Image (spheres, helix red, strand yellow):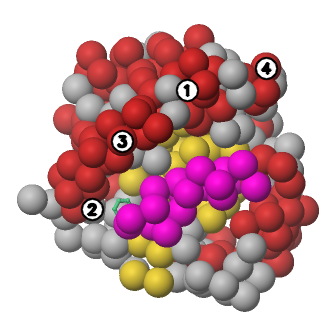
Amino acid sequence: MNILDKIVADKRKEVDLKKSLITLPQLEASVMMERTSVSLAASLRKSNTGIIAEHKRRSPSKSVINQNLNVQDVAKGYANAGVCGMSVLTDGKYFGGSLDDLVLARASVNIPLLRKEFIIDEYQIVEAKAYGADVILLIAAILSREETKTLSELAKSMGLDVLLEVHNEEELQKSIMPSLDMLGVNNRNLKTFEVSLDTSKSLSEQIPDDFVKVSESGISSIEAIQELKKYGYQGFLIGENFMKTDDPGTSAKMFIDELKK
Ligand SMILES: O=C(O)c1ccccc1NCC(=O)[C@H](O)[C@H](O)COP(=O)(O)O
């Protein structure tokens, strides 16, 4: 069993439990359902920098990254730095995140918020909207084409943007469909945890131009972004590089200021 298999097995149990605790009609009664979402894809299209900064306390590959921060401070810091969007990990067991993190980030900033989660059920999409997300992540490695279609169409019907994450050509080819806004190539091999920007480079040509291209994971230098831009990438998802510092907002600001030079 690889890490994704383990995460998904746990997620199925978690979602079943949640459905029995908070019903769909209860989620649908959230005031957030009336909120107009802010598009991350639009924000990336008009940006020269394209940074999506992540709130990430720990991860299966790195164990603890930073457990001492207040998510509201991190969100305000990222917004002040001029990021295009913020990614909030909501998985508890493997990443130390929660839906509370999403709500607190939403209460602090108006930038696009991505719910970074292992989505396998429509319930989690309603949940994302109800807790203030603007964007959901779908991971091709854990979904069939039919599931990707059903989930992405539901998200679009709720006004949410959809970022589809792929790791290889097979996942990309099986998943391309009009109900996606952004295609994210994850540079981290989730079986070995090895990170290589070559994954983004080699898949870039196969991503149709209608989708915003996002490169995810292992990005820590200006040079890497300049290189990825040559391959058509407009979005860059960065977690650990900012979160490992005492002040991720200031780190993101220095990074973005440097990128603008
Ligand atoms: O980060 C991990 O170890 C990980 C393991 C298993 C599944 C997903 C994982 N990460 C999710 C992500 O996509 C990253 O948090 C995100 O791309 C930021 O990556 P980084 O800049 O390398 O922190």
Q: Can the viewer see residue 171 in this picture?
A: yes
Which of the image's four quarters has the C terminus? bottom right
- Of 162 and 44, the residue lying toward us: 162
Q: Which mark is residue 153?
A: none
Characterize the local packing of mark 1: few (<14), some (14-19) or many (20 or more) Cα atoms within 10 angstroms: many
Residue flagged by tag 1: what amino acid is it? Val
Q: Is residue 59 left or right of residue 228?
A: left
Residue to which mark 2 is pinned: 189
For the point 9% across and 59% down, which residue is it? 1
Q: Which residue is mark 4?
A: 34
* Disc number placed over residue 126 in the picture, else none: 1
Q: Which residue occupies the extreme right position in the image?
A: 80
Secondary-structure class at tag 2: loop
Residue mark closest to the camera, 2 vs 4: 4
Circles 3 and 2 in contact, beta carbons < 8 Å: no
Q: Which residue is outermost to the front?
A: 21
